Amino acid sequence: MGGFAYAGSLVGGAPVVRKLQTGETMYVGQLVKSSVTASIGGNCAIADIAVDAREDTSKILGICTGIVDGSSTWVAPVSGTAAYGQRTTYTTTQATVAAYGPSEVEVTLIIPGVTLVRAPIFNTTWGTALYEIVNVTANSAGTTIVSPVATADIADDLGMIYCRSGANRGIYRTITDITTVTTTVTVPFPYTIAAGDVFVQASCVLGYGGMDLTTAFDAIDGNNVMDDYYAVYYHEVNLEESGKEYAVFSLYSGPMPEAA
């Protein structure tokens, strides 16, 4: 799956689509935000953090779902780099604008609390699967998983861990602490965690959570410490199959609930 995609509406009806001039080169499948950078022109930009102290200071408008102007070009996806695909090339050259028109994209709007979006979950870059943890130390209490290498210190309660093999296969738990190689959950897995059991963890959590983006802004970065993020509501987080992890979310319009 390449990039973010419209997945329906919680209230029904057709998706709302607008044509907007973009202030930078953009690919289908990237998230779109208001254009807030000075002097680049256009009505929208990629939902990155290049000019923001925090990602969620610039509101997401929607998903780039098509290229409108004549500069449209296909760029083959590269695993571990970006989904790429159909591209509009931003330009300020008058002759090029006269020939092809200004860089313009089709944006399917994401209405907070209403629009459902499906997105792949990768490790930092598109096409790179999340790291599989082969548990090193047995734990009869079902509360700790020990990785052979250090993993990202996902902020408390903003990540999930899923058991792919072992007695707890198919069960998710919310992560409450990660200390170098040890992941801790407060609600225990029902069975003993054995050495050799396989787990995968991601910086996504069912319900209200945070969303950070991969380096090309075309997928969810599941290996992130979650210091900056967009506030979302996760309706589904699926970590079952390596390289095919995904989530379905809607944007959360209010402030993130504070921890008790």
Image (spheres, rainbow, N blue to C red):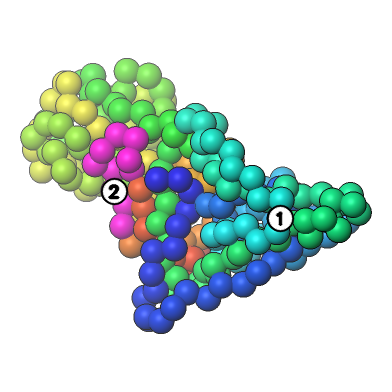
In the figure, is residue 211 to the left or right of 55? left
Q: How far across and down, in percent of the image, does residue 51 sit?
A: 75, 49
Mark 1, secondary structure of its residue: loop
| Mark 2 residue type | Asn
Pointer 1 residue: 70
Q: Main secondary structure of the magenta part?
A: loop
Q: Quadrant of residue 249?
A: bottom left
Q: Is residue 222 above or below residue 31?
A: above
**First in sequence: mark 1 vs mark 2:** 1
Magenta highlight on residue 39: no
Mark pair 1, 2: CA separation:
38 Å
* Other residues around mark 1 within 10 Å, as few (<14) / some (14–19) / many (≥20): some
| Mark 1 residue type | Gly
Q: Is residue 75 above or below residue 7?
A: above
Q: What residue is rendered at 32% in x and 18% in y? A: 148
Q: Is residue 223 visible?
A: no
90, 8: nearer the viewer: 90
Q: How far across and down, in percent of the image, does residue 202 sit?
A: 37, 41
* Other residues around mark 2 within 10 Å, as few (<14) / some (14–19) / many (≥20): some
Pointer 2 residue: 238
Q: What residue is rendered at 64% in x and 45% in y? A: 73
Query: Which label sits in the foreground, 1 or 2?
Result: 1
Residues in magenta? 236-245
Q: How far across and down, in percent of the image, does residue 213 sit?
A: 53, 46
In the figure, is residue 119 to the left or right of 198? right
**Residue extending farthest right:** 94
Q: Which mark is residue 136?
A: none
158, 65: nearer the viewer: 65
